[in-house]
Each structure stands twice: as structure tokens, then as C-alpha cells.
Image (cartoon, helix red, strand yellow):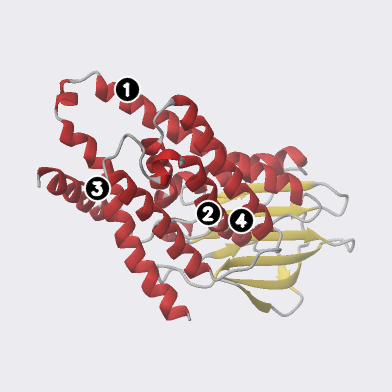
Amino acid sequence: MRRLLSGLLCALLWLSGTPAHAHKLAPSLLEIRESPTAGDYDISWKTPRFSPTPVPIVPRLPASCQDIGEHNALYEGTGVRVRWRMHCPEPLSGAMLRVDGLAENQSAALVRIEWSGGGVSQGLLNGTEEGFRVPEPAGSFGVFRDYLVLGFGHILGGVDHLLFVLGLLLLARSGKQLVVTVTAFTAGHSVTLALAALGFLRYPVDLVEFGISLSILVVAMELGRGDPQGAHFLRRYPWGAAVLFGLLHGMGFAGALREAGLPEGEIPLALLSFNVGIEAGQLAFVAVAMLLAAAFRRTPLVRHAWLGWVPVYLIGVLSAYWCFERGLAAVAAL
């Protein structure tokens, strides 16, 4: 009973300090392509169709720029893309661009400018940095850097993915098994991330989100058996669960990448850097978790065995809550 109450208390404290959704709002994408005609630009603005607040996410271009065409909207999955044409009498390089509403919606926006000469300038905006001054054309390094940051931020902002990784850490019984398990999870989600981001794999988003929460619950239930001898499949072969469930989590990762969009001509580089960012965030989380575990073992608290069940109940209660929440959303979307 003490173990159960401790786990429930930690879960309730966690829920009281976090939003109902496991992810922040997906990032938006502002693409500006310079036309051969002096001063003309083709604008593409993609943003999520729905937001958790009434505050809209709106791009703000220089005041001297004027629309010279109609705004055409097209729904793309969970996002909407608006295209139009604009004329700017003054050079865009050196001008200030803004995206309002990012802080209120806990979101981010990737700004990408393709110059007629072939160069590219990019910037990543968020709630604390809603504007940036357009630099001179960057190159492939800018693409790699921005998508790396995007992937790193996405994994660290996804509580559900992190709890699944924590569950894998608790399942592993040795350092070697831990390395194999984390590598298997990487292999699994990398496959579906690439296939989904490139458009080869389509699926109901709500159903996949439910599957992700269910995968976390399955791991939590296995941890709750308290069978360190590994009599069950997940205990004996945690890498197998990591591969299978990693396929589901990869589809979840791809959702954020699809919302941001992949830059034409640099799709392989953007996909690679986004995946590297996810892996970097994942490894950072693993390192912090192992350091905290090592520090805990050096304290007098290690004598209280029931404290070891706190993360198990935390994972179980939160994943059960997400199963209920996302299951209802999946049924409603049918």
C-alpha cells in the first residue's frame, strides 16, 4: 500500500504541473522563396490547424512588403498550408521577421528563405525568441544545425517518449543489455521516422498516439511484475520490445517533422540531422537518469526498498491516463 500511495502521489504531483498533452504544439514552418523578378517572393506558411489557446500563430513580414496575389489555403493532415505572393521594395536580407503567438501556444517556428542565387537562410523561433534578423544566405550547415535543434527539443519535450526510455532502462539488467536495448529502440524509430517523413507511410495520427501510450503501459506492467529473474519475454528480451514499440514512436516523431516540413533539395540532410537531434536528446536523458540512479545509491534512502517502485508507478499511472485520453480521441476520430 505504501508503494501504491507513493506512486500515485508522485503521478498526481506530476500531472498537476504539466499540460494534459504529452507534447507541445507542433512547430510551424514559414518558407520564403525569392523569385527571379526583383523584389518578388513566394510565401508558404504551414501551421497546425488547431491550437490549445485562442491566440493565433501569425507570421509578421516587413511592413514595406505588399501582397500581390490571393492567399490559397490547403489542409495537409493536422496542419494547414497557406500560399501567396509578395513584393518587397527593400532587400529582405537584414530585415526583421517575426512569428507572433509562439509563447502563448508553447510552440516553435522554423523560418526558411531560399534565395534566387541558390543560397539558403534559416532561423528557429520560439516563445522566448519570436523574431530574428534575416542573415545572409547560410548553407547546408544551417539546415543541419536547425533540424538538429528541432529534433533535440522534440524528444526532450515529449514526456511520453522519455518515460518509455526510462522503462527500458529499468528493464535492462546489465550494461550490455542496456546498450543493445537503446540501440534497438533507435533502429526501430529511425525506420518509421524516415518512411513517414518522406510520405511512404500514412496512418491515423490519433491511433498511433494511443499505441504509443499503450506501449508505455505494457512496459510499466512488466516492471510491476517484480521479476528480476526475467521469466517473461520483456524481461528476457527488452531489445525486442524496444524495436517493436520503437516503430510506433518513430511515427510520433515523424508528426513533428511533417509539421515543420522538409526543405526541398536538402531532405536527406534535414532528416538525418533531425534524427541525430532525437538521439542526442535521448542519450542526454539516459545519462542524467543513470547519474541520478548512481547518486541515489550513495544516499541512506537506498535502504527504503519501496522507493524503487516510485518510477514504476509513475510510468504506469501516467501511461494509463494517456491511454484513456488518447483512446477517446482515437474513437472520436473514426
Question: Can you give x and y, in whole percent of width and height, for residue 165 in the image?
Answer: 43, 42
Q: Is residue 80 above or below residue 289?
A: below
Question: Can you give x and y, in whole percent of width and height, for residue 125 in the image?
Answer: 56, 50
Q: Which mark is residue 257?
A: 4
The nearer-to-camera label among 3 and 4 is 3
Q: Is residue 296 left or right of residue 55?
A: left
Q: Is residue 224 left or right of residue 257?
A: left
Q: Mark 3 Cα within 10 Å, few/some/many (few <14, many 20+)?
A: many
Q: Which of disc 1 and disc 2 is earlier in sequence?
A: 2
Q: Mark 2 Cα within 10 Å, few/some/many (few <14, many 20+)?
A: many
Q: Which of disc 2 and disc 4 is earlier in sequence?
A: 2
Between 224 and 316, the one lying in front of the other is 224
| SS label for mark 4 | helix
Q: Is residue 309 above or below residue 20?
A: above
| SS label for mark 3 | helix
> What residue would you read off at disc 1?
294
Q: Which mark is residue 307?
A: none
Q: How many marks?
A: 4
Give how far apart the Cα atoms at labels 2 and 1 are: 35 Å
Instruction: Check whether the beta carbons of the residues at disc 3 and disc 4 lie within 8 A of each other.
Output: no
Give how far apart the Cα atoms at labels 3 and 4 are: 31 Å
Q: Mark 4 Cα within 10 Å, few/some/many (few <14, many 20+)?
A: many
Q: Residue at x 45, y 41 (%)?
A: 238
Give how far apart the Cα atoms at labels 4 and 2 are: 12 Å
Between 203 and 267, the one lying in front of the other is 203
Name which residue type carries label 3: Tyr
Give how far apart the Cα atoms at labels 4 and 1 are: 35 Å
> What residue would you read off at disc 2?
108
> What residue would you read off at disc 3?
313
Name which residue type carries label 1: Ala
Question: Can you give x and y, in whole percent of width and height, for residue 159 in the image?
Answer: 39, 49
Instruction: Check whether the beta carbons of the residues at disc 3 and disc 1 lie within 8 A of each other.
Output: no
